[in-house]
Amino acid sequence: MDATTLQGQLTTTPDGLINGTARDTTRPGESLLVELKLGHGWSANIPTDAATGVFEVRPPAQAFPDGEPLDITATVDGLSLPGSGAQVGPPLPLELVAGDIVNNCNLRCPFCLTDYALTRGTKQMPAETYAHSLKLAPLVPESAFWLSCMHEPSLNASFGQFLDLVPAADRRRVSFTTNFAKKLDDDLLRTIAQSGAHSIRISIDSHDPELFGQLRKGARYPVFIDNLTRYAAIARETPTAPLLHIITMAFKDNLTEMPELVRWCHEEVGARFHEVRFMYYLPHVAEWGADHIMSLDEWEQLKRDLLALPMAHTLAFGEPEPDAHKKFQELPGIDTYEHVAAVFGGTVTTENYRRVDPLETGYAVPDEPLRLRLRWDGLIMAEQLPEDEFRLNVLHIEDPKYFYRLRAAAPLRADSPWKRV
Ligand SMILES: C[S@@+](CC[C@H](N)C(=O)[O-])C[C@H]1O[C@@H](n2cnc3c(N)ncnc32)[C@H](O)[C@@H]1O
Ligand code: SF4
């Protein structure tokens, strides 16, 4: 091979992707080894796909402690690939910020993930905490900055203003889940439709007003339907409206109406993604669940029926955990379960909070983007880390580049193609 027979290109993205093609015209169909060299002394040898000549790799987060792009060169047998010398940005340090802008819900669904037994009163995320939280938005991929995860975002009186406050560059990173059960005025619905958010997830489990009220305990069907149909009309008039994603919890109770519900959401409401979800097991909802979950045969038949619908391509199934039925039969943890004051953080408050930072303790963080949860009061935890090894308040993160440093501190994964020379 010489410079005249090497064909290909190196391309990079600002959010940390290195890819391209490399082919030797004298050896068609053969895999080549692309030698990549990244600033700060990192290198990797990546083979191309023999058939297509394509190669692709992510740079190591460890190379970007300050979150700034680095130069990258690519050579094959010492010959430089076109595009070599470009810059590549760091991989995004966070996979998800699953935030909540309140601590409560207006409903008490009998299957709810959140145990509200000890919740008294609604606490709202203060504006200053929200402003600090927004600094994390550039660190996540599209749709992965959630304004709600475990609670109901429409209970925050500033919900509309919060959506307006998202910087234009980060709007596609925003999404949220709502029960749409509180009476919502047209102004708020318009704000949602014009927010530029990537997607909104609306929960609906039944068209039968009585069953709706039993599953969504505390909700009134006419209020929900009025919100949803007014929102659908506004969204239809708004070309940039967020993708409408529906979540339906599947139980014995709503099994027969499911095909019609899916059709209606798609055709009448404009849903472009519909998740039909089997209930997760949690001790506080185990007894209710035991009486209401479908058998595995019913679930499999339901999936076949739904996949026969013309809008089957919009469907996704939240499968039961492999041992779900055993759990709902044996009810593990039900005897020893104690109600918790908050979905995480236990009794920690902003007053008694103590910072636990792996960058100070030396605790080894895993070599993967972190999945953060963010409480209404700014408390943060990471799903991959024990709570007593990582505890921060978003108000105390001076610079969001902290998360690049945290990622860079992770020991390199054993299967990483990168090494530091
Ligand atoms: C916890 S809720 C919070 C957002 C909002 N209050 C709502 O219900 O849409 C988020 C989603 O989780 C679903 N969900 C609730 N309990 C669940 C469970 N035990 N297993 C799986 N999903 C559940 C809800 O139906 C909803 O779609
Ligand atoms: S509406 Fe959502 S958060 Fe509220 S109780 Fe139901 S599932 Fe839980």
Image (cartoon, helix red, strand yellow):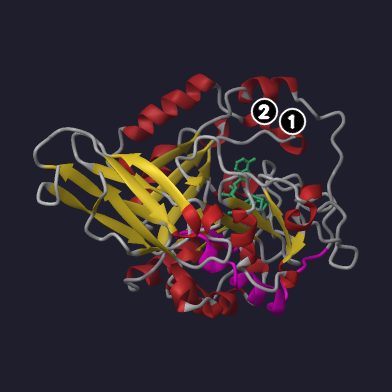
396 left or right of 302 in image: right
293 is higher (above) or lower (below) than 40: above
Depicted 7 relative to depicted 152: above or below: above
Q: Which mark is residue 124?
A: none
Q: Which residue is mark 1?
A: 287
**Residue 361 position in % (x across, y down):** 79, 53
Res 162 quadrant in image: bottom right
Query: What percent of the width, then of the height, locates residue 303?
Result: 41, 30
Residues packed near mark 2 inside 10 Å, few (<14), some (14 to 19) or many (20 plus): few
SS of the residue at dot 2? Answer: helix
Compare residues 235 and 401 and report the one nearer the observer.
401
| Marks 1 and 2 close (CB-CB < 8 Å) | yes
| Whole-percent x, y for residue 18 in the image | 35, 53
Ligand 1 within 8 Å of disc 1? The answer is no
Visible in this render: residue 159? yes
In the rendered view of the protein, which quadrant contains the N terminus? top left
The residue tagged with tag 1: helix, strand or loop? helix
Q: Which residues are magenta?
A: 121-149
Q: Amino acid at mark 1?
A: Glu
Q: In terms of depth relative to the viewer, which is nearer, 125 or 88?
A: 88
Query: Is 297 colored magenta in this rendering?
Result: no
Which residue is painted at 53% across and 60% down in the image? 64
Q: Residue furthest right?
A: 352
Q: Is 36 positioned to the left or the right of 157 in the image?
A: left
Identify the mark at residue 291; answer none if there is no mark. Answer: 2
Residue 272 in the image: x percent, y percent?
A: 36, 53
Distance Cα–Cα, label 1 vs label 2? 7 Å
The residue at the point 42 percent across, 40 percent down is: 316
Reply yes or no: does residue 131 show up in magenta. yes
Q: Is residue 308 left or right of residue 380?
A: left
